[in-house]
Amino acid sequence: MSWNSPAPPPPPPVLPPSSSTPPKLTRQSTYVTQICDQKDVRKSFHERLEKNVLKRNGKKIVVSMNKEVTPVLQDGPSCGLVAVVMAAQLFDTNLTFDCIFNAAKQKGFTRQGEMFSASNMKQLVEDMISDTRVTSLDMDTGPELLINHLVKGDVCLIPYDSDFNFEPCNKKGHKAHWALLTGFGLVLDSSVSDKKGLTMDDGCVFNVASDTILSNNLLDDAEDILVYGLQGKSQYPGVWSLSSIIASNRNLVEVDPNKQDDDIGYILPEEGIDKALCSKALVLSRGNLNPQ
């Protein structure tokens, strides 16, 4: 009996010629609505407030105004667009990340989701969120105008340098990031609660409406002012001093050199971020925005 030799294996497929330039990745949808227990978010928020108050000398309270927003987490350099998606919830606008990302690309504002221009952000918000008035603020004029807007129930989109824990820091713009300010807290001496007839809601936190703050002139009694910020890298609101985020906003003078690499593909303002981002913020307002 004879045995036939097995057929030789087929030749391997021909590979395309190698290239020293890696292929560009196609951007996929990065819109993620964070599924979270709002009670858990609320609990964490109040714990942060109380921790901020307890570290101070003497008995203090916080008179607080805030709006609850469903957190949206970013994937990639899309903090500004994600902040707008979160803001849209307060204006009854069902805005998805894909929708605003595509619009920003078509306008030539972004490639990967980055937004290094406050004026471009303003135009984008005006185009994407209906029934919204967008006001540009010059933060060099001081914090009073921003607080007055927050007291009225407006919200604010503000660029700042984000530290490892997402709190404001001063890195000259190398950690530039966008946040949505949804409210504020006034740190007061506890004796003010009796004098003004305030009713405590949760520990040392008093949740009030704007007319309570204005009618009792509580801004004049404040020893410190806190702001509450949502940003795309955490589901929990930040509790930051107003002075720290304004200082961070005012220090945005240059882009991280690593982000100026052409291979990364960011769209950067020709005039530099010292003119496009530094000391700039955007207030979003509408007549029927009611604080919670």
Image (spheres, rainbow, N blue to C red):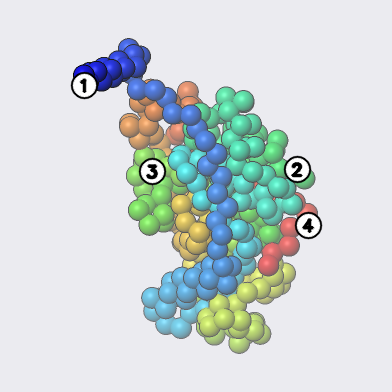
Residue for badge 2: 130
| SS under mark 2 | loop
**Between marks 3 and 1 in the image, the one whose residue lies nearer the viewer:** 1
Task: Report how far apart the C-alphas of labels 4 and 3 lie in the structure.
Answer: 35 Å
Q: Residue at x 63, y 54 (%)?
A: 155
Are there few (<14), some (14-19), or many (20+) residues within 10 Å of tag 1?
Answer: few
Q: Nearer the viewer, residue 44 or 63?
A: 44
In screen coordinates, is 149 left or right of 224? Answer: right
Residue for badge 4: 288
Q: Label 1 amino acid?
A: Met
Q: Label 4 amino acid?
A: Asn
Q: Are marks 3 and 1 in contact (CB under 8 Å)?
A: no
Q: Are marks 1 and 2 in contact (CB under 8 Å)?
A: no
Rendered image: mark on residue 287? none
Task: Report how far apart the C-alphas of labels 1 and 2 lie in the structure.
Answer: 86 Å
Residue for badge 1: 1
* Mark positioned earlier in the residue sequence (4 or 1): 1
Residue for badge 3: 175
Q: Label 2 amino acid?
A: Ser
* Mark positioned earlier in the residue sequence (4 or 3): 3
Q: Residue at x 42, y 24 (%)?
A: 24
* Mark positioned earlier in the residue sequence (1 or 2): 1
Q: Residue at x 40, y 36 (%)?
A: 253
Q: Residue at x 63, y 50 (%)?
A: 87
| SS under mark 1 | loop
**Displayed quadrant of residue 6:** top left
In screen coordinates, is 55 left or right of 221? Answer: left
Residue extending farthest to the bottom is 194
